[in-house]
Amino acid sequence: MSTHDNGHEAGHDVVVHDGDALPARFENPGFEKHHPRMGDLDEHANKKSERIVVALFTISILGTLFFLIAYFVWPPGTTPVEMRRSNLALGLGLAFALLGIGTAAIHWAKALMNDHEKSEERHEQRSDDDTRAGAIEVLKDGAADSAIGRRGVLKGAMITALALFPLPIVLALIGNIGEDWNIGQLKHTMWKKGTRLTTDPVGRPVKASDVTIGSVWHIIPEGLDKEPHPLDEKAKAVVLLLRLDPRDIKREQGVGWSYDGILAFSKICTHVGCPVALYEQQTHHLLCPCHQSTFDVADGAKVIFGPAKRPLPQLPITVDDEGYLVAQSDFHQPVGPSFWERLK
Amino acid sequence: MSTTAAPTRTERLAAGTADYLDQRTGLGAAVKTFARKIFPDHWSFLLGEIALYSFITLIISGIFLTMFFVPSMTETVYHGPWASLNGVQMSEAFSSTLRLSFEVRGGLLMRQIHHWAALIFMASIVTHMFRIFFTGAFRKPRELNWLVGFTLLILGLLAGFSGYSLPDDVLSGNGLRIADGVALAVPIIGTYASYLLFGGQFPGQDLIPRLFTVHILVVPGLILALIGLHLFFVVLHKHTQYPGSGRSNKNVVGYPLFPIYVAKAGGYFFLVFGVIALMGATMSINPVWSYGPFDPSPVSAGAQPDWYMLFLEGALRLMPGQAEIVIGGFTLSLNIIVPAMIVPGVLFTALAIYPFLEAWVTGDKREHHLLDRPRNRPFRTGFGVSLLVAFLILVLAGSNDLIATHFHLSINDITWAFRVLIFVGPWFAFWVTKRICLGLQRKDRELVLHGHETGRIVRFASGEYIEVHKPLDAHERWIRVQHDAIRPLEIEPAEDSRGVRRKGYRIDRMRQRISTVFYEDRVEPVTPAELAAAHSHGEHDSLAAADAHAEVTAGVGAGVVSDGRDHLSADARDH
């Protein structure tokens, strides 16, 4: 690839012709000259490096001693200040114990040890042909010794036996690892007709009259703490209770599911299940802090932005004789993230 | 130093021990082979070492933690020195984490060391992997070791996620809830996958003990075994080296294991551990007591997973919800499947198979022990950068709420910007990187052909001005011309001499097309002939010639005078 413009000085052509005889590639020029370090030439510099290494090891020893002393002198105590002090003292002691050794060893290697580079031959990974032939020979001999060649049934029996033997372990594991495998549980919560809405976490029943316009309540069903697995139930049943000015409500998921502007929605995001917790009172928007799905509670908790598809399920509510808020029924659809059989 | 005549007591003891061991193990042969084994030196080779040493740090601190941590979801009520949580109901996992942090002396330090070491472990794996990638160290014979390293990356993610969830705090609990949501989205078997994971409904009673086994036995066991294999391959293949004077594909140039690397690598372990200890001492990490125990109801705004999970979080945030569809009554949550399974699947698969793809389109079956300078492989470097940019955009998308609150921007606008960027950014990054690589290669050619600019402007008797260039010495030149020029594949024609269609032509054709994408744009290294031509050309550039003339030294900043003949074409496609 020679694309020079026309030479305009005498003698050019000659050189270019010479160039044609040159090798196609440059030659490796071989090792560069070794540059001695200061310490290789100057005894004082060498001694100084040695003293630095000694000093660094000494720092390590002091660090270890400091840790041992700090362990007894500053226990974690009972206040955050004491805890922080204990952590800081122990940590600094350990850090200096380690950094001292590390820097000393590396400085030793760099300043005092022989720094002449050495070269070692590489060999191809591949075995040579004789070795390969030998390996094949050995395998053939082995196969012949095993007498497997002519015995098809034996081969089949062996492979079947080996393929089947893990089944007992796999079966026992799969059979038990999902406990009861009752996936129907995902479609129901412990809300049912008449269950009182109570505050999270204390479980105090809520009177409709206590819920002011614009407020938000975190709600759990009454009797949650008496369930055999309260957290499992809570993970499905948590509800957000809000009161809007009834004139602001554009749409609900069911007729008569709210009570005087009080709406109850599942708190579990329909995207991947985070609790939806940020409520913007002015716009009636609910925002999931995990992935920013945004729901409009005035419009049936419709998704207006983000990765969720479905509205938050609404819990039909009403009041009982004493004026406490109660559920009319369970949710009318499974709460939380979508799953394959959700609509079946 | 002692003389041979009178060995000291220590020497006699050492000789006796060596004899005892050698008679029983034949240790002598191994020592003779390996003690002075040569390893090349370069700062970028330390990245993998950081990964190894932070893993050892993880094991040391992790063993300490298992002595005090109780992997149980049994409910208990906390009574201890952390006043704000006194009387609060929580799992034993969480309460033992509190005890471990506040009552065990050095416990908090070990916890923080463990967590910082985990972050550094993942960071060093990723940077090490990209060092390998950009320098082409994955080429034959090291493709299998690339896969071992890739598996270690995945196991590292698993170790991180399983460990981070163990304290059973509300932050990691919501992370698990997201994991449950993702498991549920798997078509057909999703609900069963979720039940399998949690032993029934979320959160269940089984998860923490199961994660504990995964975290302290299964995953670290596999990591340890694979690290052994990884290092075995390094010894077997001998370490790669950067190109340079005296270095070739047939040798390895560096320092012997004993004593240089015993001291350097051994010292480096202490350095890595020491820096992590310093971080554990001075920087708070994952203060679960300020989050509180897990409860399915509360959630904190601005919550972030550890950095290596952030890209998944970002992908989940970007995907619009409309993608969820219902087919024949079954729900297919593409709004989760795409970001949580397909996106990472594509990113990771691309990374895992790249060495095989590159070898295939390059048609290269030779062993490679000399590393590439990234500029000399513009396609590969551009591809690597575009993967990193895609990862980075997803990481930033996973922090869109923090960006919104810190910079007072609309979260919806930011999300939309990232939705566009995830498609545009990687392409743009690829294009820019490739152009930079080609530019750097042209610069290399320019330097080899014309030498360094010296800033000396010389006037000839004829009145002509030139700038004197100082030619490169052989070592400077070698680094810029040592690489192979790789050209697109040439294939045999579709039909043989008798006009019969050749088998496998279509595959060859596809291979050639991909190869063209890889290598069509290229700058080839200077050949001796080109250099000779350039020298003859600008002969009066040389100092000897210049000194014969009256010399004018230009001040700094004076415009470079070009005689037009310095512009030998260094164009990409001038073959």
Image (cartoon, grey):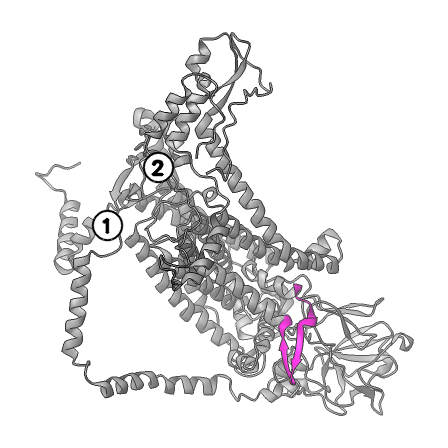
The x and y percentages for residue A111 are 34, 34
**The quarter of the displayed image where residue B317 is located:** bottom right
- In the rendered image of this protein, does residue B135 appear above or below residue A133? above
For label 2, count other residues whose C-alpha is less than 10 Å away and answer few (under 14), some (14-19) or many (20+).
some
Q: Amino acid at mark 2?
A: Lys
Tags 2 and 1 on a common chain = no
Disc 1 on helix, strand or loop? Answer: helix
Visible residue check, residue B494: yes
Q: How far across and down, in percent of the image, does residue B383 sit? A: 52, 52
- How many C-alpha atoms fall within 10 Å of the one at disc 1: few (<14), some, or many (≥20)? few
In the image, B362 versus B502, the foreground residue is B502
What range is drawn magenta here? B318-335
Amino acid at the residue labelled 1: Phe
Please tell me whether residue B571 belongs to the stretch shown in magenta: no
Give the farthest residue toward the front. B498
Q: Position of residue B362 (x, y in %)?
A: 41, 52
Asked if residue B325 lies in the magenta stretch, the reply is yes
Callout 2: residue from which chain? A
Numbered tag placed on residue A110 in the rendering: 2
Tell me the SS state at disc 2. helix
Q: Is residue B354 visible?
A: no
Q: Quadrant of the N terminus of chain A?
A: top left
Number of dots carrying numbers: 2
Check disc 1 and report the residue beneath it.
B34
For the point 34% across and 29% down, the residue is: A37
